[in-house]
Amino acid sequence: MKFDIDETLADMLKAIKVVVKDNWKNVKDNANIYLQDRRNRLELLASLRLDKEIKEEFFQKRLKDEQKILESELHSIAIMSKAIAQKAANAAFDVLDKAISTALKL
C-alpha cells in the first residue's frame, strides 16, 4: 500500500469521530481545520520517515509533539473532557503511524 496523505487525514478524522461520538458535531470543524492546517507538516514528516531520512525514534517524538498540539486544539472545545480529547488525538495519530509503517513495509 502506498502512503496517501489525503486518505490518511480522512482516516484520522474518522478515528477522532469514533472516539468523540456524540460530540462529533462540535468537534468536526476544529479537527478538520487542524488537520488541514498541519497537512504539509504531517506530509513532510511522513515523507522523511518513508525515505528513511529520519530514524523511527525521532519520528515518534515529532508525532508525539503533533499529537499534543491536536489534543490542545480539542481541549479548546469546552464540552470535551481531557480524557476524550487525549483519546481522540491518540486515535488520530495511531492512524498516521500505522499508515506510514504499512508503507515502509512495501
Image (cartoon, helix red, strand yellow):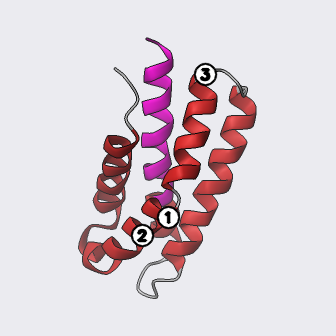
Q: Which mark is residue 51?
A: 3
- In the rendering, at what x and y percent does residue 19 appear? 34, 60
Determine crowd level at label 2: few under 14, some 14-19, many 20+ residues with C-alpha closer than 10 A: few
Q: Is residue 100 magenta?
A: yes
Which residue is depicted at the point 34% across and 56% down? 13
- Contact between labelled residues 1 and 3, with CB atoms less than 8 Å apart: no
In the drawing, does residue 29 fall left or right of residue 68?
Answer: left
Q: Where in the figure is residue 80, as x and y percent of width and height?
A: 43, 79
Query: Whole-Å distance between the Cαs marked 2 and 3?
Result: 27 Å
Name which residue type carries label 3: Asp
Three-letter amino acid code at disc 1?
Answer: Asp
- Give me the residue at 63% from left, 31% from top: 48
Residue carrying label 2: 33
Which quarter of the image is occupied by the C terminus?
top left
Residue 96 painted magenta? yes
- SS for tag 1? helix
Q: Earlier in the sequence, mark 3 or mark 1?
A: 1
Helix, strand or loop at label 2? It is helix
Whether pointer 1 and pointer 2 mark residues with C-beta atoms closer than 8 Å, the reply is: yes
Magenta extent: 89-106
Q: Are marks 2 and 3 in contact (CB under 8 Å)?
A: no
